[in-house]
Amino acid sequence: MTKKNDILKGRTFVCTYPEKEQDELVTMLTNEGAKVLSMPVIEISPLPFQLKKNIDQYDWLIFTSKNAVQPFTDSYPKVPCKIAALGEQTAQKLEQFNLQPAFIGSGKSAHDFVDEFMPKLQNNEKVLVILGNLAPDTLQQKLGKKAPVDRVNVYQTHAAADIDSKILDSIDQGAYDALLVTSPSAVRSLIQKLKTTPDQLRFISIGTTTTAEIRKYGTEPLATANDPSYKGLAEATIRCYQSKVKI
């Protein structure tokens, strides 16, 4: 049994991502004495899609998010190509569908992934980038300088239809310690829903891409995870408060 240290005793955190059956982040924070509220502000849903080429004409498939894995494999359960994954979470999701990545990037950002993956890519190897509707064209633009790249959107991210108004009110009243955010779209959705100005909000971010979105609103997160994963976000939260004294 995990020892409870109470580092976060008396602290309240709001998770803004879609609920999960087994949530390592929630377990880690509650083991440290925290109260964790779930308030999903975005929803993920599959999109119908069609490839520009037969799948066996591609040399590489690139998955940048775990959210892309099931929508794609529902149509293509067997993949005759090499697979690249952005981050361990994406790689683990692929493995659940018996797909083994030949390359796993650090997961910090699409820009970092390009730098890491480019040496693996041979000139004129055909690449399919599998994304969500809000993802920028970073991979196509940069990898396209070396090889032909197609893009397909297999899922969409949109604001949650039903957000807990009581938790929103608590945030506007300042009755929380930090908002745990895992994507730029979650940051935007939160700011749209809250009355509080962005510079008064307290964020802890899963990674550099999400932190960049927070900074667009003129504020700085309390912490950014070194490892862009739910576990990394929990670790960043615990580190952030280890040296703080509850007032």
Image (cartoon, rainbow, N blue to C red):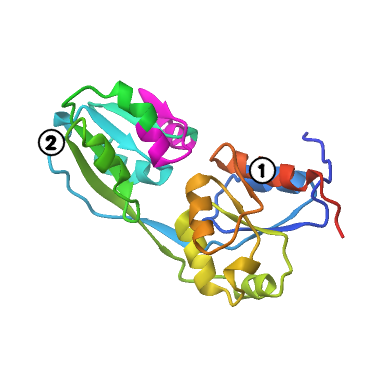
- On the picture, is 93 further left or further right than 231? left
Q: Which quadrant of the structure image shows residue 174?
A: bottom right
What are the residue bounds of the magenta stretch?
Answer: 89-114
Kind of residue at disc 2: Asn
In-front residue for pair 220/95 = 220
Q: Which residue is mark 1?
A: 236
Which badge, 2 or 1, comes first in the chain's sequence? 2
Q: Secondary structure at mark 1?
A: helix
Image spot of residue 172 (x, y percent): 66, 74
Q: Compute the Cα span from label 2 to label 1.
A: 43 Å
Residue drawn at point x = 39 percent, y = 40 percent: 110
Identify which residue, 43 or 211, lies in the foreground.
211
Give the image quarter of residue 62.
top left
Task: Work out whether 227 lies above or below 212.
Answer: above
The residue tagged 2 is 54
Looking at the rendered image, the quarter that the N terminus falls into is top right
Q: Position of residue 56 (x, y in %)?
A: 16, 29
Q: Is residue 39 magenta?
A: no
For this view, does 213 lie left or right of residue 131?
right
Residue at position x 52%, y 64% from top? 217
Residue occupying image coordinates x 21% and y 27%: 59
